[in-house]
Amino acid sequence: MASIAILGASANREKFGNKCVRAYKKLGWEVFPINPKEEKIEGVKCYPNLLALAQRPDRVSVYLPPKITQSLIAQFKDAGIDEVILNPGAQSDELISALEEQGIVPVLVCSIRLEGISPSTL
């Protein structure tokens, strides 16, 4: 089963960080919501950070402000992450450069649309 870690996962069903959890659950993926303030999102156990996961996810999707994501680059490296999806609004030129300098490939795409789902249907 494919797996995805969603940084910035949200309990608020209006936010894309929640819609992403629902979309990937619907597709049958193993979902790892990353949110240190929540215990569960959409019935799925939350994790405080990537390093708390027992396995390396197949995909990492980011719904955080660029400055916060930039502070997590060392954690990405420690977790063996070599590619991250920066959803619309989660990217900046500075973040993209910082990721690339560390050998992490930034993918600029909506992770929900990547799987052929329109966020407006969630």
Image (cartoon, rainbow, N blue to C red):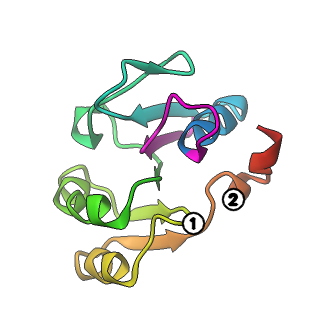
Magenta span has 35? no
Q: Is residue 26 above or below residue 100?
A: above
Q: For the magenta stretch, what is the residue range?
A: 1-16
The residue lying at 72 percent from left, 30 percent from top is 26
Q: Quadrant of the C terminus?
A: top right
Residue 54 locus on image (x, y percent)? 29, 30
Which callout, 2 or 1, points to the residue nearer the camera? 1
Helix, strand or loop at label 1? It is loop
Residue receiving disc 2 = 114
Q: In this picture, is 44 found above or below 83?
A: above
Residue at horizontal 56 percent and vertical 39 percent from the top: 2
Residue 55 percent coordinates (x, y): 33, 35
The residues tagged by marks 2 and 1 sit, at their Cα atoms, a distance apart of 12 Å
Q: Where does the N terminus fall, quadrant-wise? A: top right
Q: Is the residue marked by circle 1 packed among few (<14), some (14-19), or many (20+) residues within 10 Å?
A: some
Please name whichever residue, 49 or 1, is drawn nearer the observer in this view of the structure. 49
Residue 115 horizontal/vertical position (percent):
72, 52
Q: Amino acid at mark 1?
A: Pro
In the displayed structure, does residue 50 sit left or right of residue 71? right
Left or right: 22, with 107 as reference point: right
